[in-house]
């Protein structure tokens, strides 16, 4: 059974989704997944430009080909990430505004929802694995051992998800 791999992927998914929640700091992960129309082809922003964070509240997106600065700016606006890009002709600059207390609380709720979805995914994985164990017709005591093992794995990954959520919550509530 590749249950452990599935659980790792569920945890990685939670961690990846948490990086897209902005914490008031500039993080290149904020623009992950933004596709830019480049010569008629939707292209990931990361493959068109260098993305750096020279200051805590600023992202600089310097394209390898200056002719696509306007396309990058347009793609960021359409992505609706809550930040208006500015363009100096050579690069796109994203200035991250200070988060309000209300916005921070919304983001904490969002982080908790992402964590809960991760735990639901883990429960589904556990259910699948339990069904596989039962279907394999192991002797009763062996089956019980496998199920206990499975529960230990679930507990471990649930704890890891809780730790990730706690980290994100701390990062969000930090002023």
Image (cartoon, grey):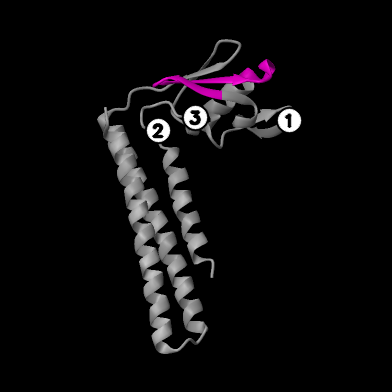
Answer left or right for 128 relative to 57: right
- Residue at x 39% of width, y 72% of height: 149
Answer left or right for 19 relative to 37: left
Q: Residue 167: percent from the left, percent from the top?
A: 32, 42
Q: Nearer the viewer, mark 2 or mark 1?
A: 2
Is the Cβ of the residue at disc 2 closer than 8 Å to that at disc 1?
A: no
Query: Which label is found at residue 28?
Result: 3
Label 1, on which residue? 40
Q: Secondary structure at mark 3?
A: helix
> Can you tell which quarter of the image residue 154 is in?
bottom left
State which region is magenta: 51-69
- Residue at x 33% of width, y 56% of height: 159
Which quadrant is the C terminus positioned in?
A: top left
Q: Secondary structure at mark 2?
A: loop
Which quadrant is the N terminus positioned in?
A: bottom right
Q: Residue 15: percent from the left, percent from the top?
A: 43, 46
Closer-to-camera residue (162/41): 162
Label 2, on which residue? 22
- Residue at x 38% of width, y 27% of height: 25
Give the mark nearer the N terminus: 3 vs 2.
Answer: 2
159 in the magenta segment: no
Give the mark nearer the N terminus: 3 vs 1.
Answer: 3
Closer-to-camera residue (88/139): 139
Give the mark nearer the N terminus: 2 vs 1.
Answer: 2
> Can you tell which quarter of the image residue 34 is in?
top right
Q: Residue 97: percent from the left, percent from the top?
A: 37, 22
């Amino acid at each position: 059974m590749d249950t452990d791999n599935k659980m790792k992927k569920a945890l990685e998914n939670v961690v990846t989704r948490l990086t897209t929640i902005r914490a008031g700091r500039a993080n290149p992960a904020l623009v992950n997944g933004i596709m830019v129309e480049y010569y008629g082809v939707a292209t990931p922003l990361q493959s068109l430009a260098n993305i750096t964070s020279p200051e805590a509240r600023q992202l600089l997106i310097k394209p390898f080909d200056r002719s696509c600065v306007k396309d990058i700016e347009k793609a960021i606006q359409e992505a609706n990430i809550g930040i208006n890009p500015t363009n100096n002709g050579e690069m796109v600059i994203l200035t991250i505004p200070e988060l309000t207390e209300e916005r921070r609380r919304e983001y904490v709720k969002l982080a908790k929802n992402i964590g809960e979805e991760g735990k639901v995914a883990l429960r589904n994985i556990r259910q699948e694995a339990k069904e596989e164990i039962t279907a394999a017709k192991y002797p009763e005591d062996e089956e019980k051992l496998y199920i206990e093992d499975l529960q230990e794995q679930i507990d471990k990954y649930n704890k890891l998800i809780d730790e990730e959520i706690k980290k994100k919550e701390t990062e969000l509530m930090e002023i």
